[in-house]
């Protein structure tokens, strides 16, 4: 083949970086349309984002373990589940957003990381309100009917205290079948006790968030404003391997592009 040989390019790594990266027009002048398209596509693929691999929890505090407000004894707390971001781009973005809210008015909290393997060992069965099994649907409907009967009885006996309690529980069970706005914003103790009694460890809140009932250990915590660095550190090796492979393909295909 004529033109620039692959051997000369292999000894000039900065040239490859330049082709894959910024000043593309200068470097590829004269390669023709097919050569330009090839380099453009390579540049796009070589910086492809790698999927997050762990679970994340944004908090004003640097934590050693993640637990619910109820378990921590927070006064007046109703949240009996810990909302944890799944290993998705949006999940990590959500955790980072909460990690930017610090305590006592500070500008930065923390993103607390839970190892994927640890999460999967602790959370084996997740309830999905959008897709309950028939068995779970029937069990929840039975609880709803029971609460309605208890409310009627409380009305007849003027038992206002228990009537309010039963009404709250009724709403809790109804949201297990039909969450408001398709999002369960609060995991109550009623939710947790009922689901744990049936072997569930968590509730699937959305594509990017899960509510976990029990404590989870934190592997490490990073300040919210540095969460981006956490992502870069997790994905750096994979990104370098991807670029290395892309550059090998580049050396071979660039000769063909120049030859045309």
Image (cartoon, grey):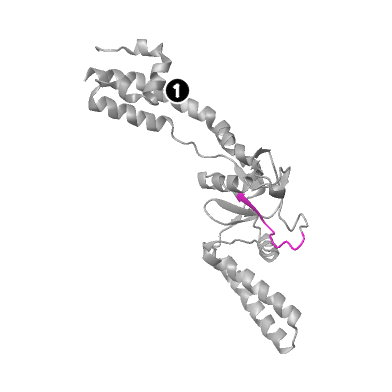
Structural crowding at the residue carrying mark 1, measured as other residues with C-alpha within 10 Å and reported as few (<14), some (14–19) or many (≥20):
few
| Magenta run includes residue 139 | no
Give the extent of the magenta segment. Answer: 75-84
Q: Position of residue 155 (x, y in %)?
A: 70, 86
Q: How far across and down, in percent of the image, does residue 199 sit? A: 66, 58
Above or below, 28 against 59 in this view is above
Q: Is residue 163 above or below residue 3?
A: below
Front residue of 29/54: it is 29
Residue 202 percent coordinates (x, y)? 63, 55
Question: Which residue has dot 1 on it?
Answer: 244
> What residue is drawn where x is 63% and y is 61%?
186
- Quarter of the rendering containing residue 1: top left
Q: In screen coordinates, is 67 left or right of 100?
A: right
Secondary structure, mark 1, is helix
77 in the magenta segment: yes
Q: Is residue 6 above or below residue 200?
A: above
Q: Residue at x 54, y 63 (%)?
A: 133
């Amino acid at each position: 083949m004529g033109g620039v040989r692959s051997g000369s390019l292999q000894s000039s790594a900065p040239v490859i970086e330049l082709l894959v990266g910024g000043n593309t027009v200068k470097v590829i002048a004269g390669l023709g349309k097919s050569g330009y398209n090839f380099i453009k596509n390579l540049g796009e693929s070589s910086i492809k984002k790698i999927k997050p691999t762990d679970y994340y929890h944004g908090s004003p505090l640097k934590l050693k373990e993640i637990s619910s407000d109820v378990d921590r004894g927070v006064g007046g707390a109703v949240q009996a589940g810990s909302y944890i971001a799944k290993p998705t781009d949006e999940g990590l973005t959500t955790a980072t957003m909460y990690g930017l809210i610090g305590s006592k008015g500070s500008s930065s909290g923390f993103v607390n990381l839970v190892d994927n393997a640890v999460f999967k060992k602790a959370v084996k069965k997740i309830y999905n309100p959008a897709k309950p099994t028939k068995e779970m649907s029937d069990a929840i409907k039975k609880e709803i009917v029971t609460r309605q009967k208890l409310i009627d009885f409380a009305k007849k006996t003027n038992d206002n205290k228990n009537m309010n309690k039963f009404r709250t529980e009724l709403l809790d069970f109804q949201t297990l079948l039909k969450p408001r706005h398709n999002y369960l914003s609060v995991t109550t103790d009623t939710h947790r006790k009922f689901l744990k009694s049936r072997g569930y460890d968590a509730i699937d809140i959305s594509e990017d968030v899960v509510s976990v009932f029990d404590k989870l250990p934190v592997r490490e915590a990073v300040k919210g404003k540095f969460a981006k660095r956490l992502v870069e550190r997790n994905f750096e090796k994979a990104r370098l391997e991807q670029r290395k492979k892309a550059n090998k393909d580049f050396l071979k295909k660039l000769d063909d592009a120049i030859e045309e």
